[in-house]
Amino acid sequence: MSMESFEWDKEKDIENWTKHGVSFSEAQSVFTAPYRIIVHDTTHSITEERYFCIGKTGEAILTVRFTYRGNIIRIIGAGRWRRGKKIYEEKNQVR
């Protein structure tokens, strides 16, 4: 993936760090992870299309919820979520 531009709401970033222990700046690294997976988020795609990017960073498998706004990736949420880990492991045969 080429160099992407990212944006996010600063208050949401603080809230996400407090709740999930993951900053949105850390979440950006998932987009360059070698075995990342992009999945359509059908549950939250109401007013705009949303997606999950699931990938390994260090020892953690992170799931990042995002949308595209033009050429910019807007990060909406991120965490070490079990469902994302399960999808990642199934698709990648646990790397």
Image (tube, rainbow, N blue to C red):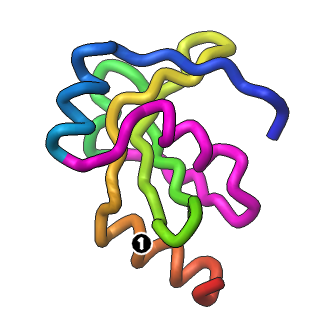
Report x, y in % for residue 86: 40, 78
Question: Which residue occupies 38% across, 36% down?
Answer: 23
Report x, y in % for residue 92: 64, 80
- Residue 9, quarter of the rendered image: top left
Query: Magenta span has 61?
Result: no
Question: Which residue occupies 31% across, 19% down?
Answer: 47
Report x, y in % for residue 14: 24, 26
The total of numbered circles placed on residues is 1
Q: In this view, does 52 lie to the left or right of 9?
A: right
Q: In this view, does 39 lie to the left or right of 41?
A: right
* Residue type highlighted by circle 1: Lys
Mark 1: secondary structure: helix
* Label 1 packing within 10 angstroms: few (<14), some (14-19), many (20+): some
Range shown magenta: 20-41
Q: Is residue 83 left or right of residue 27?
A: left
Report x, y in % for residue 50: 42, 34
Question: Which residue occupies 66% across, 18% down?
Answer: 5
Question: Which residue occupies 34% across, 60% down?
Answer: 80
In the image, residue 65 sits, relative to residue 95, either above or below, namely above
Residue hosting label 1: 85
Q: Nearer the viewer, residue 92 or 8?
A: 8
Residue pushed farthest bottom?
A: 93
